[in-house]
Image: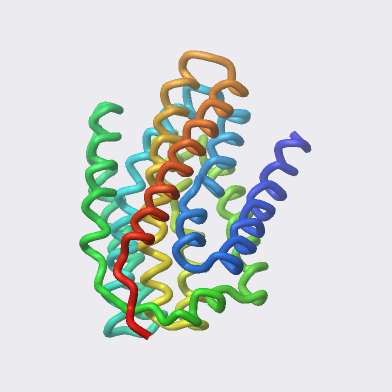
């Protein structure tokens, strides 16, 4: 029990810190791409597996996969609301949209292949739904500051503790949904919006979309392999598959960026 508690308290904050360092070095798009990787949900699913068993966690992973759609709704709602509202108002609109999306998705019970197809379709569509906002060149290095890092780490640890503590009471499906609660989006985007402006926040949210492909593959692999093999093998397979997809998406992003027209000086 002590080792599991240490896992809850230390793994997620450390991963969040590493993502923060990457965001400072490479900017909004890369920060968003890395933030969408299963930095929080992965450890939550792991601890749920250790505490509640593989079958419970496999069902939770299906809920987490479907919750990607709710996160996309959150991101798009924040991006549009930020054009007219401040940070607090935009966050309220985004949270309300997220809550409605979760309520609607929880009423659906698609089979795993259909669920995965729905998520991929939403990921393909969502970049077109973001508002256009020009990102100043100097904002890419200023989007993250030291003051928000402890808040991200604390929020991540609290989410892990809350979801894993409540898992046996709320059941596997809702546990999976809440494992995808937009902690990273809320803290990271809120502070980035305050420091570097709306355009940077929108770019960050758009960058997260591309990271969710790897996230979806991670959840799909967990949902399948936890029912078929040992726990270490399931999570190792899920991580490797997600990493391959993540690197592939990053490569495609780099190619697309290279083909983008250059602005005249």
Residue 63 spot, x, y in % from top left: 37, 38
Which residue is at a point 33% across and 61% down the rendered structure image? 74
Which residue is at a point 69% across and 53% down the rendered structure image? 14
Residue 100 spot, x, y in % from top left: 26, 57
Q: On the rendered structure, is 200 left or right of 82?
A: right
In which quadrant is the C terminus drawn?
Answer: bottom left
Q: Which residue lies furthest to the right in this view?
A: 2
* Residue 173 picture quarter: top left
Q: On the rendered structure, is 30 left or right of 82?
A: right
Q: Residue furthest front?
A: 265
Residue 169 spot, x, y in % from top left: 49, 38
Which residue is at a point 68% across and 47% down the rendered structure image? 11
- Tell how many labels: 0
Vertical placement of residue 75 versus 246, above or below? below
Tell me which colouring the rendered structure shows: rainbow
Vertical placement of residue 107 versus 24, above or below? above
In which quadrant is the N terminus drawn?
Answer: top right
Residue 97 spot, x, y in % from top left: 28, 63
* Residue 148 picture quarter: bottom right
Given residues 216 and 174, the one toward you in this image is: 216
Which residue is at a point 48% across and 43% down the rendered structure image? 247
């Amino acid at each position: 029990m002590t080792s599991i508690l240490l896992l809850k308290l230390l793994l997620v904050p450390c991963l969040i810190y590493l993502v923060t360092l990457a965001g400072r070095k490479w900017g909004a798009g890369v920060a968003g791409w890395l933030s969408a990787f299963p930095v929080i949900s992965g450890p939550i699913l792991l601890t749920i597996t250790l505490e509640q068993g593989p079958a419970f966690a496999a069902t939770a992973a299906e809920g987490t996969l479907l919750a990607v759609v709710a996160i996309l709704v959150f991101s798009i709602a924040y991006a549009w609301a930020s054009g007219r509202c401040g940070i607090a108002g935009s966050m309220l609109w985004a949270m309300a949209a997220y809550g409605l999306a979760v309520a609607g998705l929880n009423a659906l019970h698609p089979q795993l292949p259909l669920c995965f197809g729905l998520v991929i379709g939403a990921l393909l569509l969502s970049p077109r739904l973001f508002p256009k906002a020009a990102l100043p060149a100097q904002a890419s290095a200023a989007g993250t500051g030291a003051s928000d890092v402890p808040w991200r780490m604390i929020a991540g640890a609290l989410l892990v503790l809350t979801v894993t503590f409540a898992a046996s009471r709320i059941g596997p499906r809702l546990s999976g949904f809440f494992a995808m609660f937009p902690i990273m989006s809320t803290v990271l985007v809120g502070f980035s919006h305050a420091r570097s402006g709306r355009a940077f926040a929108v770019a960050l949210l758009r960058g997260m979309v591309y990271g969710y492909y790897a996230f979806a593959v991670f959840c799909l692999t967990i949902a399948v392999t936890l029912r078929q093999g040992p726990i270490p093998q399931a999570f190792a397979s899920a991580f490797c598959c997600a990493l391959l997809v993540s690197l592939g998406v990053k490569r495609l992003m780099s190619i697309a960026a290279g083909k983008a027209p250059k602005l005249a000086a």
